[in-house]
Amino acid sequence: MSRALASICVFCGARNGANPSHVTTARALGALIAAEGWRLVYGAGDVGLMGEVARATQSAGGPTMGVIPTHLLSAERAKQDVTQLVITQDMHERKKVMFMNSDAIVVLPGGAGTLDEFFEVLTWAILGLHAKPIYLLDNDGYWQPLIALIDHVVAQGFADASITRHVQVISDVASLAISLRAALA
């Protein structure tokens, strides 16, 4: 899975959320990506957690690839100083470009768009379309209701228990760093 420059796709909110620790975590993740010599692949926004992770990556000297559909250029204020900016026609193409240009996926707190991105890459993994590691960065227990929902889906017979092997739930950036280093080695 390793290549000359490993790339980490980060799905996250275009808002900061109510808990200030989400911003701190986004910044720590961006700093980690740069410190490890990886490239950030993200939704190109200059707002919310997206903007925080990108600015932290850039401040620490890391390369960034932003991918944004035309209809979100103004709403998410596309970050113009990324290393590479890709403008797509729609959300579907955005997700595909982000996924295809990454070696691992990290999901920070976010809303409906983040959930959509997470479930799409999870579904692709379940179907055997990829083996890229997917991490839920469960900052302050943010993803616990989602984890409970996945457990419920399994308990109700709508998914096999093996669904959980496609997602690693990580509670902090330091633990994520260890897992990513191992996965990208």
Image (cartoon, helix red, strand yellow):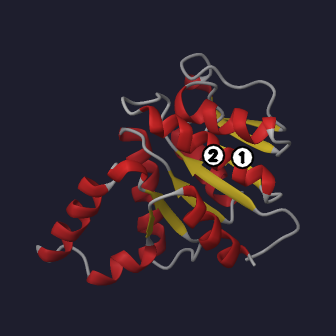
> Residue 79 at what x, y percent from top left?
71, 26
Is 145 on the left-hand or right-hand side of 22? left
Residue at numbered disc 2: 28
> Residue 139 at what x, y percent from top left?
43, 50
Q: Which mark is residue 31?
A: 1
- Can the viewer see residue 89? no
Is 81 on the left-hand or right-hand side of 87? right
Q: Nearer the viewer, residue 11 or 71?
A: 11
The N terminus appears in which quarter of the rendering? bottom right
- Label 2, secondary structure: give it: helix
- Is the residue under label 1 in contact with that under label 2 (CB below 8 Å)? yes
Is 175 on the left-hand or right-hand side of 38? left
Q: Based on the displayed image, in which of its 4 quarters is residue 171 positioned?
A: bottom left
Q: Amino acid at mark 2?
A: Ala
- Can the viewer see residue 45? yes
Q: Which mark is residue 94?
A: none
Q: Nearer the viewer, residue 151 or 171?
A: 171
Q: Alpha-carbon distance for marks 2 and 1?
A: 5 Å
Q: Is residue 38 above or below residue 154?
A: above
Structural crowding at the residue carrying mark 1, measured as other residues with C-alpha within 10 Å and reported as few (<14), some (14–19) or many (≥20): many
Q: Is residue 146 above or below residue 167?
A: above
Structural crowding at the residue carrying mark 2, measured as other residues with C-alpha within 10 Å and reported as few (<14), some (14–19) or many (≥20): some
